[in-house]
Amino acid sequence: MNNSVIPFIAAPDYAHTDAWLSALQVAMPEFRIASVDALTPEEKQTLTVAIVANPDPAVLQQLPKLVWVHSVWAGVERLLMDLGHTELKIVRLIDPQLADTMAEAVLAWTLYLHRDMPRYARQQKVAQWLSHEYIPPQRKTVSLLGLGALGKAAAARLQLAGFQVCGWSRHPKALDAITCFHGEEGLIHMLNRTDILICLLPLTAETRHLLNLKTLQQLPQRASLINFGRGLIVHDENLRIMLDSNHIQHAVLDVFEHEPLPADSWHWHHPGITVLPHCSAPTDRQTASAIVAAHLRSYMQSGAIPDSVNVAQGY
């Protein structure tokens, strides 16, 4: 393996390639971090690892000895889709800072819904002075779809804020002070008692359109939704039906099937939706670069690849 140079390969139109090159270089000065264009033909023939941010698969094919790639993103569904059938090992980013940032966003937007901010914003537009009954967090149930690193951090933050907290995962899990559910039957039981539902799931074949008319109807009347997972987990038109019927009171959406969200999308002007530009938990380049650096140092010393994505599961 080539122990001196490591390529960083991003999407052709990615705006922050230079910033990543700089951050990664600072985190691992013993290596030369370079774009593919800066590699010599000899280097391209020997490299076994690359750092990636949704790269063009054709660019990866320029590196015939490539064994594994380290993504700088936590979500890898786009990378898996772009690569198709591949023998490459894919390591995704697991960063405690990302989990903390997501937990902060979950709490912030949960409080936004809990304190009825959308209703007060509508009242301001028509100069209406009207207060509404306050319900303490102890009397509201906030439920999380996904109890991985992000879900666990978010659940702890919500519990400290006083909410009743539930969580759902595919397989059984146990967390202190959190009521945990699993499987299809558990999902229905959790939805039935949920005031604010938060999606933190990855996009897989099993989670695509998991939140559809059937499942959304299991929520109590006037429940709310926050989607910080992936856009395709929510069936878009089914959500619109639930909002138009006032079954779902409000939805905070940070992710969409098509991003950037097109200007003619119905979401922008629907009174029951708050649109966010995929900003809930941006990756911190410094902490992420340090984690990537540690994995690469270990690999160069031992040849052992870090835990990689289960391609069948999608994460």
Image (cartoon, rainbow, N blue to C red):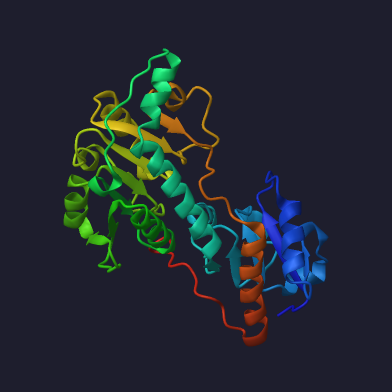
Say which residue appears at 49% left-offset and 59% top-offset: 99
* Above or below, 132 relative to 70: above
Quadrant of the snapshot with the C terminus? bottom left
Which residue is at the far top? 126
Residue 271 sits in quarter = top left
Left or right: 109 in relation to 21: left
Quadrant of the snapshot with the N terminus? bottom right
Residue 218 drawn at (x, y percent)? 18, 42
Residue 229 shows up from this direction: no
In depth, the one of 95 and 302 nearer the eye is 95
In depth, the one of 34 and 189 nearer the eye is 189
Left or right: 299 in relation to 267: right
Say which residue appears at 43% left-offset and 24% top-offset: 121
Residue 287 drawn at (x, y percent)? 63, 63
In depth, the one of 282 and 3 nearer the eye is 282
Say which residue appears at 25% left-offset and 26% top-offset: 246
In depth, the one of 45 and 123 nearer the eye is 123
Left or right: 77 in relation to 170: right
Residue 180 drawn at (x, y percent)? 24, 61
Say which residue appears at 35% left-offset and 53% top-offset: 205
Which residue is at the far bottom? 302
Residue 51 drawn at (x, y percent)? 65, 64
Residue 215 shows up from this direction: yes
* Above or below, 204 relative to 305: above
